[in-house]
Amino acid sequence: MKMGRQAALVSTLFVASLTMIIPFTAEIPRITLAVSVLRIALGMLTVFFLPGFAAISAVFPAGQLQRTDRLLACLGVSLAATVCTAVLLAALPIGLTRDSLSIVLGGGTIIASACALFRRGSGPAPKEARN
Amino acid sequence: MTAQPTRDVQGETLTFGEDPHPAVSEAPVTSPGATQLDHPAAPADARRFNPRRASAIAHVALFMVLGLILVAVADETSLHGANYSDSVAIFFAGLVAIFVPAAIRALTRNVAQQERLALVIALGLAFYAVKIMGSPTSFTFIDEYIHLRNTENILTSHHLFGLNPLLPAAAYYPGLGAACAGLVNLTGLSPFVSGLLIIGAARLLISACLFLITEKVTGSGVAAAGASLIYAANPMFLFWSSSFSYENLALPLAAFAIWWISRTRHEDNRLVTVITVVVIIAVTVTHHVAAFALAALLGVWWLAEHLFRRSGPSRREIGAMALVAGSASLAWFFFVAGPAAHYLFGENILPTMQQVGALLSGHAQPRHLYGPVGGTGDPLWYVLAGFTAMALIVLALPPALYRAWRIAVGRRAGSAGRPHVRNVALIIAMAMAAAFPVSQLLRLTTDGDTLAGRSSEYLFTGLGCVLALLAENPIQSTRVRTALRTLAATGLVTAVLIGATTIANTYTELLPEVWNPHGYPWTVQPDVIRASEWARQHLGINQVFAADSIDSEALATYGEENTISYNAWPIYLSSTMNDAVVNTIKTEKVRYLFVDWQMTQGIPNTPGDYYFSPWEPQAGEYIHPLPAIMLRKFATTDCARAVYNSGLIQIFDVTHIENGSCLPASATPGLGG
């Protein structure tokens, strides 16, 4: 199970990194359906799941939350993080754009995932809670 | 994981968040005086999902799909002008098909906690689908246009606080607009689809959080399911709470904050606090009332624990979060969202209080709760359903409060039998439940109707807890025919659902309106959208338009124009281009007039029975449509130039009147300088 969470965190790192290439998809002359679908999937994961998953994994590296609670926390924290990030960016001179949001939200997710991996590696043996 | 029941073993007071694991009790009450707090631990298999029960879930899902199909049929038949009362009957049959099987299953004994949770979430999302099916291609509610304009402003300018002509105060709570603009940026989806996704996610969040919170408060899975079902039956849940409006993101986030704090309050981890603060800030920047409600609830929670409970670090944590929420919401409200204070107090709370005062002192008559009954008005059954729902709640409330009191307050052994509060959260829920009947008195005033409706979104959380505890005892009992009692409880909640739906929605506006109806419409029509899009392309955005109330919603969003509706009535409601017309055009700096000839075909039904503003002379008293001469006058003056003319829609350029270079013949020379 430890490997499962670890793999999920590495996947989160990977997907969050992919999110940061979203701005470059706008440069593609002819956006194909596959690119559009990929962009929608990445965007939705970034707004609704990944920031929360990375943050919750960083806060609870030993998996203290049950699965249901963890999923709920991922959604709630992701939504809250998106709201705060979007408002903050729009309030700053940089502005809320595709580039700024994908870099800040994706970058924050990457940092939180790395933090979770670090804490998971250095902490006590994980205790996976199931529900 | 073994369930740990919420118990009061040695006089310790319990509150939600006390137990790090959800307290669930599925076992029967064993003695007449026993409460759900005395339930023994539930067997582990009652909490976990059992694949053998999959068929029950499949049946519920099947009924939900059937219900949604019926609702879709009702919407389609209404949209195509079929017999409206038949469509309404099909619609309510669909609602019952969605609600009843899920409610029966959720209220049945010995159902796994996860199954109940899944049912409650599925029900919340199914009701959300009902709203979407009513308007699957665009927003239709006034608040949806307000926040669509906020989103468009942020997408266009990349910054906050752009002018929102539909509701200036809304621009200062940009959480929903910014999140939606962010999703649009990241996915490339339209603002409409992005908005649906965000509110859908918020609906999932509030459904799950309410179930888990009430499970902690009541200590019972059946009661938690009952509380969630009663909350789903609140008048606003079906349509209003599903709309693209800032409160419908903020309230779920606030519920999440409460659940998160209760779930993690014993964690000795600074990062948990950081997450809590982020959630509180998200609520603060999204909606004023939800932010204040969150701060108040945290404050009351802290105070109640201070009064009734031992001290400890977890209580201090709640106090600190109450302080953060309170100071953040007040600071944002007074230092950032300046116009919101006037909107909230000047336009909503104070007028309502004045009307309540006038009502109590006998200087005003109570408002008619429904339109005329029979004939072209509301059918009798529609009115009776609303009163029945209210009567059921009011009748059930006293015994429910008594039962909740017995659960919440015990007697400490060895202290002369003095009362001892052992469930602080339930006391808070009782206070909210007791406030509900009082809040509904506001419906007797003109302006208080909205406040009463909105307050139910908050008060039904406590009301649900308390009423569900009343139903929980007989359902859990093994000595009686529990299936029958489950059915009876389901029937009562269903009656409340149907009645509450009639309370919150005018009969004629329950289902989608036909396109281009004969008469004055109550929703934005396709030809108005086309004209608005034409205006954006050919006249540019942010032009000052005068328009009627409904059309200004489309102009402000599809056209991205700065519309004036409330102050525009003197321009339209006169037979000649007189001084009042010219004066209003000049003072409001109106450059274009949006003329919808449908105003001459029917009287307004909503909102508030006016074309432009509640302050126009005949607001609420229209018997005949607008005389054609009032609109024809614009074509008779050389100072106004028709730039758009399509069907029933015209746009006039009145720039020359606005800048004073042309004066209509019927106006006084030298007017307005």
Image (tube, helix red, strand yellow):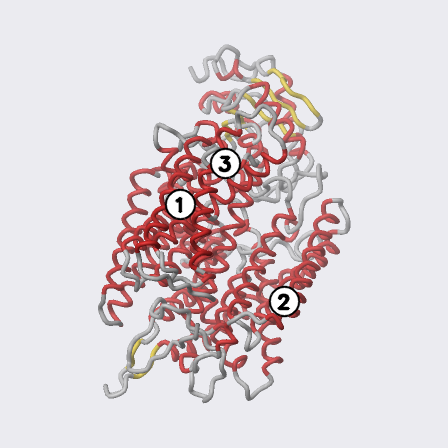
Task: Give left or right: position of B322 versus B383.
Answer: left
Task: Find residue B23 and report its horizontal and vertical position in percent.
Answer: 42, 72
Q: Amino acid at mark 3?
A: Leu
User: What residue is shown at x 59% (from left), y 18% (from top)?
Assistant: B538
| x and y percentages locating residue B14 in the rendered image | 33, 73
Q: Which residue is mark 1?
A: A81
Vertical side of B660 occupied by B646: above or below: below
- In the image, A100 versus B434, the foreground residue is A100
Question: What amino acid is at disc 1?
Answer: Ala
Judging from the image, what secondary structure is the residue with disc 2 in? Answer: helix
Q: Residue at x 52, y 67 (%)?
A: B114
Mark carried by residue B186: 3
**In screen coordinates, is B263 left or right of B107?**
left
| Label 2 CA crowd tier, 10 Å (few <14, some 14–19, many 20+) | some
Residue A58 x, y percent position in the rendering: 35, 52
User: Which residue does the image show at 41% across and 39% down from the upper left?
Assistant: A105
State how far apart marks 1 and 2 are (Cα): 34 Å
Location of mark 2 (residue): B57
B338 with respect to B380 (left or right): left
Name the residue type under label 2: Ile
Q: Residue B523 placed where, x, y %? A: 62, 40
